[in-house]
Image (tube, coloured by chain):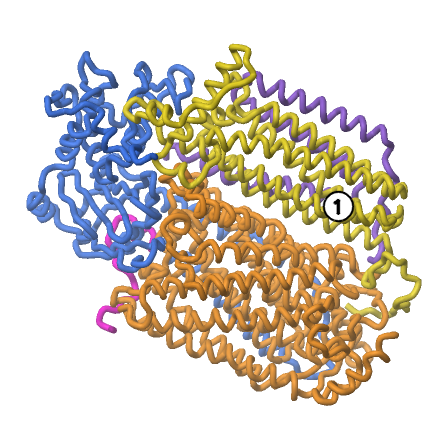
Chain colours: A orange, B blue, C yellow, D purple
Amino acid sequence: MASVSLESETFKKFADVAGRDNDVNYLNHDHSITSWLFTLDHKRIGLLYLVTITLMFLLGGALAGAIRLELLTPKGDFLTADTYNKAFTAHGIIMLFFFLIPSIPAVLGNFLVPLMIGAKDVAFPRLNLFSYYLYFAGSVIALTALLLGGVDTGWTFYTPFSSTYSNSYVIVMAVGLFVVGFSSILTGLNFIITVHRMRCPGLTWFRLPLFIWGIYATSVVQLLGTPVIAVTLGLLGVERTLGVGIFDPRLGGDPILFQHLFWFYSHPAVYIMILPSLGVASEVIATFSRKNVFGYHIIAFSSIAIAVFGFIVWAHHMFTTGMSPYAAMVFSLLTFSVAIPSGIKVFSWLATMYGGSISFDTPMIYIFGFLGLFTIGGMTGLFLSTLGTDIHLHDTYFIVAHFHYIMVGGAVLGYMAGLHYWWPKITGRLYSEFWGKLSAGITFIGFNFTFFPQFILGYLGMPRRYYEYPDEFQVLNVFSSAGATILAIGYLMPLVYMPYSFFFGEKANSNPYGGSTLEWTNTTSPPSPHNFEKTPVVTEEPYHYHGKEAAVVSH
Amino acid sequence: MFEEFKWLPEQASTVAPEVDMLMLFIVVVTVVITAVVAALTLGFAIAFRRKSESYIPAPWFGNIPLEISWTLIPVGICLVMFSWGVKVYSNIVIPPADAMEIYAVGRQWMWKIQHPEGQREINALHVPIGRPVKVTLTSEDVIHCFSIPAFRIKQDVVPGRYSSLWFQATKAGTYQLFCSEYCGTEHSRMIGKVIVMEEADYQKWLSEGAESGQALQGRKLYTKLQCVTCHTGNAEAKAPNLEGIYRKHIPISHIDGVKIKDGTKVFADDSYIRESILYPNAKVAAGWESIMPTYQGLVTEEELLQVIAYIKSLNQGQTPPRTEETPTPATIQNKSPNKEVN
Amino acid sequence: MSATNEIVQDHGQHHHKDLAHHFDTLEQQHDANTLGMWAFLLTEVLFFGGLFAAYTIYRYKYSAMFEEASNHLDITLGATNTVILILSSLTMALAVRCSQTGNSLWTGRWLLITIAFGLMFLGVKFVEWKHDYHIHLMPGKDWSGKDYWHWQYAKKAKDMETEAHKNGSAEHSLPDRKDVLADNDPSLGVRGIQESQQARLFFLLYFCMTSLHALHMLVGFVLIGIIAYFAYQGAYSPEYYSPVENIGLYWHFVDIVWIFLFPLLYLLGAHMGH
Amino acid sequence: MATTEHSTHQPAPLSLYLATFGMLMFLTILTIFAGFQNFGMWSTPIALGIAGVKAALVVVIFMHGYSSSPLTWVIILASMFFMTIMLGLMLSDYMSRGWAM
C-alpha cells in the first residue's frame, strides 16, 4: 500500500511508546487526533462508541447506586422524592437509549460486521460517522436536560403526566432522544445494506456467522421501530409546547394512544438490546466448544422471528390500562410467540456444548452467566404474558427484576462476553484471564443478589418507582442494595484490567481462542486499516472445526 | 425490620387463591425448566471440558425429533398458561351482577372514596367481608393505578373515563392500597388502607358519621345545577325523563351533532351518563332537541359521581319539583370560565 | 468458516473515478446506494405511520366531527396541489431518465423544474395555511380547554363564505370576533367543548402531517439543488447516476405521502355538501 | 457476493411516463368525484383504494419498481405489512372496547 511510507515516520514515533509491534494496523497507522475524530474507518468509529457509551454507563451506574442507597431504608432519607424520581428516570433513559441500544450494535457491530463478512468497510462510511455524531449530539442534549434539572416522568413519558403535569425538562430530553433515535436508525440501515451488498465471494446467507444474523435482525427492528417513537415524542413535544390535546383527555386526547405508540417501539427496543447478545452467545459457545453450532438455520431464523414477533406483542405492557379485554387476550397469546424462538436458542446452545471440547476462558464464563440469567429472565416473562398473573405483578418490582434479568443479565453480560472475546482482535492484546474470570463470577453473583429478591418483592406487591415503602419490604430491599455493591465491583474491575491490558498486556496472535470466523482466520490482531490484505473467499459453512483434526486426532 | 417480613402476600379475596394457584403452576414449570437448563449447562461444562488441546469434537448439525420436541412442548406449555391465564383474568375483570358499588377518584396524591350510603373517606376503603364490591374509578389529573396486592387486583385509573375493578374480600384485616402507576413527585405516598370488616361492623361503621347518602348529595346537586329545570319528568319537560333509565337501552338520534340511523340505542351506564353531562351533544336521546349546556368545569369528578348515584336511584315519579330558588340557566354561564375569553 | 483460498485484490488500481474505495464494482455501489435509499424510505413510512396511526384512532373515535372539520379545508387548493405535486413527480422521473441516457443538461433542467413545481406547491400551501390561520383553524395555546370560540368562529366564517357563494359574490368578509364571542353562549350552545376539541384534534393532525410533509419537501429542495448543480457539472453518466436516482426515489415518496393525505384530510367530509 | 443479480438500468420509454402521469391525473379526478358521493361507510375504503392504486403506479413506474430487485419489493411489502400491524392491532383494542364481557 502506498500510504505506508507516508505514515511510517509518525507510526514509528508512537508505536514504540505504546510498545506496539511493527505491523501497520488500524490503531497505529495514524495517531493524530483528527484521524480519530473524523475517521471513516468502521473499527475506529466502533472504538469512539466504546469510549462514549462507557462514560454513559458509568453515569447510569452511579444513578443506580443512588437509587439502591435510597431504598436501603423504608423512609426517604438520602434523596428527596423529586431527586429520586429524576434519578430513576435518568437511569432508565441513559441505560436504555445511550448505553444498551448502542452497546453491541454500535460498538461490536461496527467493529465486526465488515470484518466478519470479509468487507473493507460498511456500505456507507460517512453515514456511519454521521451516526456517531448524532449519538454524541443526542447524548449532549440529554445531559443538558439533566444538568438543567432533569426529567421526572420516568423513561416511559406517560401522558398526561409528561405532557401537562410535569414541570421538568421533558422537551429537551425528548429532543435528545429524537436525535439519538436517528443515530440508531442510520446505524441499522448501514448494517442492513452492508450485510446485503458487501459480503465477500462465497459468503452466502447461510454461511454468515450467527452474530451477523443477530445484528441483521436488530437492524431491522431499529429501522422499523425507532421512527415511531421519534414521531410520538414529537407529538408529545407539540402537546407540551402548544398546550393542545393530543394525549391529554381534558383536551379531548387519549392517553392510552400514547402508550400504544410508545410501546410499538419500546417493546421491540428490548430486542434491539437482546438480539445481538444472543448472537454473541452463539459465537462464543461455538468457539469455546470447538464445535459447529447445533441447528444453525433454526437459530438464524429464530433471530428474525423474534424481531418480527417483537412487533405484535406490545400491548402486554398495557393489560391493566383498561384496554379492551378481548385485545388483551389476543396480545397475551401473541406474547407467548416470542417465548418459543427464545427457548429454541437456549436448547440449541446446550446441544452445541454437548460433546464439545469446552474451555473456560473469560468470555465463556460470562456466557455461562448469561445463559443462567437469560433463562431466568425469559422464564419470568411467562408470568407476565399470562393475563391472570400479570394483573397482580404489573408495575411491581417483579417487572423491574424481570427486565433487569433480560437487559442486564442478558444484554450486558452478552456485551461483556463479546467485549472480552474480541478484545484481542480489537487491541491486539490479551487481558488477564484471572481478573477476567473473577469479574465474570462477581458480576454473576452480585447480579443475582441484587435482582432475585426483587422478584419476591414484586410478588409481595411492592410497586415500582417508590422512593419510600412500607416497612415489611425492607429485608429484601437491604439484600438487593447489598448485592448492588457486589455487582458494582464486578462492573468496575474490567474498567481497570482492560485499559491496563491495552497498554501493557501480552501481545495476542491473530487467533488466540481458535475462532473460525473471518475476523480470526483472515486478518491480523489488530486488523490492518483496510481489514484484509486480500479479499477472503469463503468455501464452507461457519464453525467448521471438524475435519481439520484428521491429521491430529482420529475418533 | 425482620418482624414484619413475610415471604408470601396475604390472600384476602376470592380471586387471590386462583391467582396463586396459577402462579404456583408457572413457578413449578419454570423452576423445573430452569433447573434442567442449569444442570445441563453445568453438566456439559464439566463432562465435556477441554481435555486435550488437539482434540476436535465430532460435529452435530441437528436432530429433527429433538428440535421438534423442544419447539412443540413449550408451545403446549404456553397454551396451557395462556388458557389458564384467560380463565383467571375473566374472573378478575367480570364483576358479579349483584356487586355493591363504591366510587374512587384518584388525584395527585390521594385516593378519595365515596360509598353509596354517603360515607366518604380519603386513602381508606372500608368494605364488608363476603360481599362482591365493584369500585368505579376515575382520575382528576394523571394516570394512577388502584392496586390491592392482598386481593391480587389492579386497575389503572385513567383521567377522562371510568374504569372499574371488583373483588370479594374473604378475610378481615387491614391491607395496603397502592398507587402503582407512577404519577409524580409523591407517587410513593399515594398509599391507602383497605379495611375489611365483618358485615355487622361494616353496618355500624356506615351508620357512624355518614353525612347523608351519596344519592342524597346528588339530589341536592340535581337542583343546584338546574338539571331539574329541563329534566322535570313531566309534561313541561324540555329534556328526557331520567326516571329509571339507569342500565336501560336508550334510543338516540344524534352522535356528535350528526343524525344517525333510526333505532340506534345506547346503554345508559355510568360512562354514558358522565359523557352526557360533560358532552351533552355526544349522544342525544331520540325525540329531544340538543339544548343542554356542557357541565365541563362546573362539576368535580366527585360531584359527578354523586349525580350519577342519584340518577341511578331515581325511580318512577321521584323527580324533585322545581323550586323558586332555581335560578335561570344564565347562572351557569356566569360561572363559566368562558367569560375569561378576551 | 474458513477461507481456504483468497483472490488477489488490487488496491487503488483500475478504480473508476466514481467508485468508493470499499466497493469492488460500480454495480455493487449502485445497488447498495439504491437499496440504502429504499431502506431509508421504509423508516420514513413508519415515521409518517405514527401520525397516520394517531389519525386513524381519532378518526375512528370522532368520525362525525372529523368529517365536519374536514369540510373546512379547501378542496380546490388541495386538488391543485395534488396536480402540482404529481407534475413534479413526472418531471423528477424525466430527470432520472435523462441521467440514465447521459443527458446531463436536461437532467439539471428537469431537476430545477421539479424544484419550481415544489415551490409552487408550498406557495399554495402557504396561502392555505394563512387562510386557515385567519379563520382560527390553527390550534394554538389559546385554543385550549374551554375556549371553544375558535371553532365557532371557523364555523361562522364558513357559513358566511357559503352565503356569499350563494349570492354569487366571490368576495366575502370574515366574521367579527366580538360577534362570535357574544354568540358564544354555552347555555344555548348545542355544539360545545367536545366538538371544539375533536375538531381541533383534526386540525392539529392536519397541521402536523402537512407541515412534516412540507419539511420533507424543503429538505428535498436542498438536495435536489445540490444534485442539479453536479448534473450541470457533468458529474453523472449512464454508469454512475445513483444520486439522481436516489433523490428521485425520495421525491416520489413525498408525492406518495401527499396522495394519501389528500383524500384523508380534504375529501373526508366532501360528501356532506360543500 | 460482490456482484449481485444484474438489474436492468435501461431507461423506460418516455410514453410510459406520460401515460402514467395521465393515469394519475384521471385517478385524482376520480377520487375527488368519489369524495363528493355519499358511499356511507365505504367512502374511506374507496378513497384509500384509489390512493393505493395511485401510490402503486408511482412505485412501479416512477420509482422503477418494475425493474427493481426482489429485495426492494421485500422492503415495499414490509412497509405495508408493518403499517397494517400497527394500525390493525391498535384498532383491535379500540374497536372491541365496547363489547360486553
In this rendering, the answer to whether A308 lies above or below B36 is above
Left or right: residue A110 versus residue A484 is: right
Which chain's residue wears label 1? C
Q: Residue at x 80, y 64 (%)?
A: A540
Left or right position of A198 against A346: right
Is residue B162 placed above or below C173 in the rendered structure?
below
The kind of residue on which mark 1 rests is Gly
Residue C114 position within the rendered picture, expressed as x and y whole percent measured from the top left: 75, 37
Main secondary structure found in the magenta portion: loop
Q: Position of residue B68 (x, y in %)?
A: 61, 54
Q: Neighbour class for label 1 at 10 Å: few (<14), some, many (≥20)?
A: some
Query: Which residue is at the far top?
Result: C167
Q: Which segment is the magenta one?
A: B1-21
Q: Nearer the viewer, residue D35 or B114?
A: D35
Residue A308 x/y as whole percent: 60, 49
Mark 1 element type: helix
Query: Would you name the residue on which mark 1 appears?
Result: C225
In the visual, does B64 lie left or right of A196?
Answer: left
Q: Residue at (58%, 78%) from the top-left corner?
A: B46
Q: Is residue B7 magenta?
A: yes
